[in-house]
Amino acid sequence: MRVTPEPDDLASTPASAAAAAGRIVGAAAASGTRAARRARASIRRNPTANRAYRTAVGVTGGATVALGVVLMPLPGPGALVALGGLAMLGSEFEGAKKVNDKATAAAKKAASAVAERRRRKAQRRTSPG
């Protein structure tokens, strides 16, 4: 598959080689996203392929969620693995998308609470008193 960036993706001169590489990678990702959308649209038109695709997404996403739940008590990214599985399921199933949105919001809220707690703790350490 040949990746061709859109003309406006490369219109201005990049500030650095890293910026140029980032633009090229971004253009490739956008091209891949368009190709994936076209492929998924063709799968939706074929009922047998659509059923097989949805089953594969369900099995893969469900297994990923189950793995994430098993990994949660252990140190590591168990919750992130479970959220990733929910995201997979949410790509095809509306109920899973709603659960994923709620779980992601709760995770972001918890992460911001932890960050705020750490910021206050660091502030107490550095303040004279």
Image (cartoon, grey):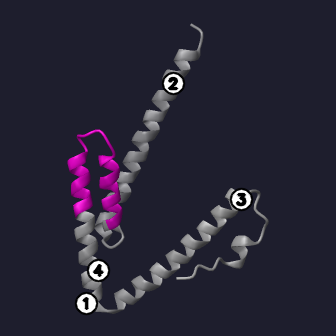
**Amino acid type, callout 1:** Thr
User: What's the residue at 72%, 74% (across, down)?
Assistant: 8
Write the residue at 25% across / 57% down: 65
Spatial CA span between label 3 and label 1? 47 Å
Asked if residue 93 lies left or right of residue 7, the reply is left
Residue identifier under label 2: 120
The residue lying furthest to the top in this view is 129
Instruction: Find residue 123 and report its image quarter.
Output: top right
Residue 54 located left or right of residue 38: left
Q: Earlier in the sequence, mark 4 or mark 3?
A: 3
Using residue 91 as the reference point, say whether residue 28 is left or right of it: right
Tell me the tag on residue 17.
3
Q: Is residue 119 above or below residue 10?
A: above
Q: Position of residue 14 (x, y in %)?
A: 75, 62
Q: Which residue is mark 4?
A: 53
Foreground mark, 4 or 3, reads 3
Magenta segment range? 63-88
The answer for how far apart the CA atoms under marks 3 and 2 are is 39 Å
Q: Is residue 53 above or below residue 109?
A: below
Q: Quadrant of residue 111?
A: top left
Of 111 and 72, the residue lying toward us: 72
Who comes first in sequence, dot 4 or dot 2? 4
Camera-side mark, 2 or 1: 1
Secondary element type, mark 2: helix
Instruction: State the separation of the CA atoms marked 4 and 2.
Output: 48 Å
Asked whether disc 4 touches disc 2, contact meaning CB atoms under 8 Å apart, the reply is no
SS at badge 1: helix
Q: Earlier in the sequence, mark 2 or mark 1?
A: 1
- Judge whether 35 appears above or below 84 on screen: below
Residue under pointer 1 = 48
